Amino acid sequence: MTDLFRGILVSVGAYVTGRAVLAPFWEAQPAHALSYLLGLLAFLLAVGGAAAWRRWARGEAEPPLHGPARYWRFSVDHKVIGVQYLVISFVVFFVAGSMALVMRAELARPGLQYLSDNGYHTAMGLHGIGMIVVALTAIIGGLGNFAVPLQIGAADMAFPRLNAVAFWMLPPAVLVLLSAPFAGGFDFGWTAYPPLSEQGPLGRLSFFLAFLTVGFSSVFAGVNFLTTILTMRAKGMTLRRIPVFAWGVLAAGIIIVMATSVVASSLLMVVFDRIIGASFFNANRGGAPILYQHLFWFYSHPAVYIMILPAMGVVLEILPPFTRKPLFAYDVVVAGFLAIVGLSFIVWAHHLWTSGMWDLLSLPFMVTTELISVPTGAVFLSALGTLWCGRIRIKAPMLFALGFLANFLVGGLTGIFHADVPTGLHLHDTWFVVAHFHYTIMGGTIFALFAGLYYWFPKITGRMPDERLARVHFWLMFVGFHLTFIPMFWMGTRGMRRRVADILPEHAGVQTFVSLSALLIAASAVVGLWNIVRSARRGPRAGANPWGSRTLEWTTASPPPEHNFDRPPVVTEPPYQYGG
């Protein structure tokens, strides 16, 4: 659709100017950006946005949608939208994972085997931004959309049509991102620092257009979640009775609304530098490239907590029913979530130790970065306190929740090295950073995603997952993950730089081992996908509450009816009153 509108613009431009030479218009960056915006709008109207808003303007009810076809339509049902988010998240997950395997094949031996430098960096950029999109959208957009309204006793989200628009903005963004390699690629990774990002082929501009689209979608979703949780709770559900997963989504929503506009502004400034000749970050014309880094990381470090806070909420939601104990220190957890939100906005500059930032800023940012580990540690201790002396049942959700705790412990402890200026300077831009980041995001968010998916799978599909396949999925993923990323800590401390397509000859054996270990992670993803598809079609029928949980979503049928509850629920006690 972008190419269609670019062709229309080229034809109109050629007609108006009386010129027959179309190539300069076709390749022009302004035409590319404008055609994408027109294509995005046309896509939203074509998938049903126009009809939905027209019915709203006329005061007409939404027609009920039934059967599998409803997942391919512009639906305003939060449960359908949650499944749609999960589907597109797993599509991006497998594409980004494939890029990781391509990178690992290149890095298995010294020298360039399969990719050029530009090809390697484009694969790295697709992997990086793809996994960021998954981590940002899968839990909040997928599990959050499905479970949060049910957990708080609401019939739907506060703004159902905006909710649908937020989802349907993602497919065009994903498609234009996947088209970038065919338009010259983008070799600046997922951070897109100027001045490199302000020049070069259209593939780089495609990256910014996709990133901006995901950002606006994220803001729409954040506003919707905040309004829903704060204003649509069931009667009797006070703030101290909100399920902890909803608290995690609420905390992430605050960061989304406050910080995403900042990174959007930085991306727009780069786009303006590219297409209209502005000079926000062009040092030759008075711009400041380091300003981009400040704006980017002001969002992108809090974005880690957009990923982690809902993940923590998922894990803490799972622990009580599988230990038959109340959640330990519920009030401390909620306070910890909110403290993380506040502190997350004053830690970003530890990413700029080597950038030329004013040296006197290093000390306060080192202190604030260390300080954020206190509420994070309190939340982690709540999980340990819930496990202590509990009657633990080892089922698939519990396995992945325990895997999250083990992985996130390593990710949190290795983060301390980057917070301190001396070690941060030494380890900056090495594979130690790569390992730490993967222990935090993949070891944390992705493990929590699978924990939540297996936990709410009976509620989503009405069927139980295959427990045997789920265990194979977990152990392949857990063992493969540690075998892949633990050696990266070692290589990082010994000078292996990230974002390079070649490796040090002395690391060849370790790199081959890492590349082979990554195949275990790929195998685990295939097993997990097969389990989800097979169980959704032929798994045993699930009851309304197969795990014996006490939150509101388990008081309705599996899957839930169209309007969630036959009558508005009334809450009379906290959500985790188990027998001890």
Image: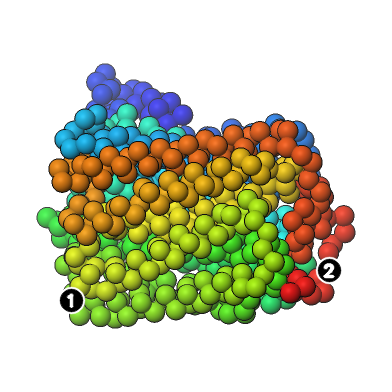
Q: Please name whichever residue, 259 or 573, is drawn nearer the observer in this view of the structure.
A: 573
Quote the CA–CA distance across marks 2 and 1: 56 Å
Q: Quadrant of residue 387?
A: bottom right
Image coordinates for residue 366, horizontal then vertical, percent? 29, 77
Q: Residue at x 27, y 39 (%)?
A: 512
Asked whether residue 498 is in view, the answer is yes
Circle number at residue 570 = 2
Asked whether residue 57 is in view, the answer is no
Q: Earlier in the sequence, mark 2 or mark 1?
A: 1
| Outermost residue, top side | 20
Circle number at residue 359 = 1
Image coordinates for residue 87, horizontal then vertical, percent? 58, 39
Type of amino acid under label 1? Asp
Taking the image as shown, residue 488 lies to the left or right of residue 311, namely left
Taking the image as shown, residue 530 lies to the left or right of residue 262, namely right
Q: Please name whichever residue, 227 or 416, is drawn nearer the observer in this view of the structure.
A: 416
Circle 2 sits in a helix, a strand or a loop, which is it? loop
